[in-house]
Amino acid sequence: MKFVTILLLSGVFIGSIAWGVLEAQATTEVERTLSGQRMYLVDLRNDGYRLAFPQQDNVRVDYKDLQSDYVYSVVAPNGRSLFAVRRVFDRRGLEPPRDTLIRRSLEGAGGDEEIISLPLVNIFRCAVSTNERFMIIAGRLKDPAVGTLRDGIFILDRSNGEVQYVAPYPKAGSNEDIRSLNVSDQGNVVLYEDAGIIVAFVGEKRLTFAERHPGKFPVLMPDGQAYVYADRGRLILNDRKAEREVLRIPEIAGAIRVSPDGNFVAFGVESGGDTQLRICELSTQKCVDGPKYQDWIAGRETFWIKR
């Protein structure tokens, strides 16, 4: 009986080793693919970023000529530019803080800061299209004609500076439910989550409400039309005609990010009380784990960059 038990335990042990080897090989294969295409997932900090996956000897890049820390920042879906918010407080405390929107290239240590002019005094959240022409911004708009402040979700056309109102946004600091903002390259699709509900607006000249349904963390695919989102343990692809399940996934913590080539998705998952980065190849449904957030990633999400 002992002999049989030992054999069974040995089988489990050997099986565990074999699984560990296969998992390590899969991770190495994904890392090799991403490194070959110079695509990396990074953890954004106030003054730079750190490579999270594939890891390369704790590589950290500090932004050059940084005038002050960024309180909020995102990376364009193409992985090549950073858009960040610099906040200035009134030293006397008599005026509310004012925000400046910055763009800078992520090549090397990052290019020079480019200030983006826009009629907003505060920026709560923002995202940018793949071609960097359009931005979707949740912020506080100052209307010169009325002279009052107004909170909302707006779309900015960087080619001409025009701003279009899309939807209301709760008073600053009172709501964390609206997240995962997206805008297409033509500015004709806006997508975001509002407290577990996916909301979409579409339109060629003027955006209008198009759909709402349950789901979390929506993100546009590179074509700017189809999108993926999480819903009850599934990653769903919506191509505007139909929906289909792409992956079975655990509970997601943090945003879903699609790689610049559209072949990979990355997100955080709950694992033993911790949050761990997970990277999946959509075509093969192969998934590998990256680092745990408590060890490597300061925030609740990572971004793809092209180096």
Image: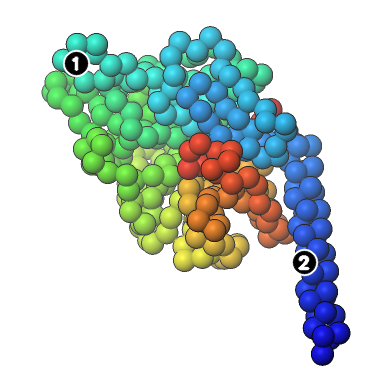
The one nearer the camera, 203 or 106, is 106
Q: Which residue is mark 2?
A: 16
What amino acid is labelled 1 in the image? Gly
The answer to the question of whether label 2 and label 1 lie on touching residues, with beta carbons closer than 8 A, is no
The residue located at (25%, 37%) in the rendering is: 173
The residue located at (28%, 16%) in the rendering is: 89
What amino acid is labelled 2 in the image? Ser
> Could you say which quadrant of the image residue 291 lies in?
top right
- Where 132 falls versus 283 (above or below)? above
The one nearer the camera, 140 or 164, is 140
The one nearer the camera, 259 or 191, is 259
Percent position of residue 256, x then y: 52, 48
Label annotation for residue 70: none
User: Callout 1: 10 Å neighbours few (<14), some, many (20+)?
Assistant: few
Tell me if 122 is positioned left or right of 101 in this view: left
Percent position of residue 269, x then y: 54, 54
- Where 241 falls versus 46 (above or below)? below
> Which is more N-terminal, label 1 or label 2?
2
Residue 73 makes an appearance in the image: yes
- Where 49 falls versus 185 (above or below)? above
The residue located at (67%, 31%) in the rendering is: 58
User: Callout 2: 10 Å neighbours few (<14), some, many (20+)?
Assistant: few
The residue located at (43%, 44%) in the rendering is: 180
Q: Nearer the viewer, mark 2 or mark 1?
A: 2
- Quadrant for the N terminus, please: bottom right
> Could you say which quadrant of the image residue 213 lies in?
bottom left
Identify the secondary structure beneath mark 1.
loop
- Quadrant for the C terminus, please: top right
Residue 225 makes an appearance in the image: no
Identify the secondary structure beneath mark 2.
helix
Label annotation for residue 93: 1
Tell me if 153 is positioned left or right of 272 in this view: left
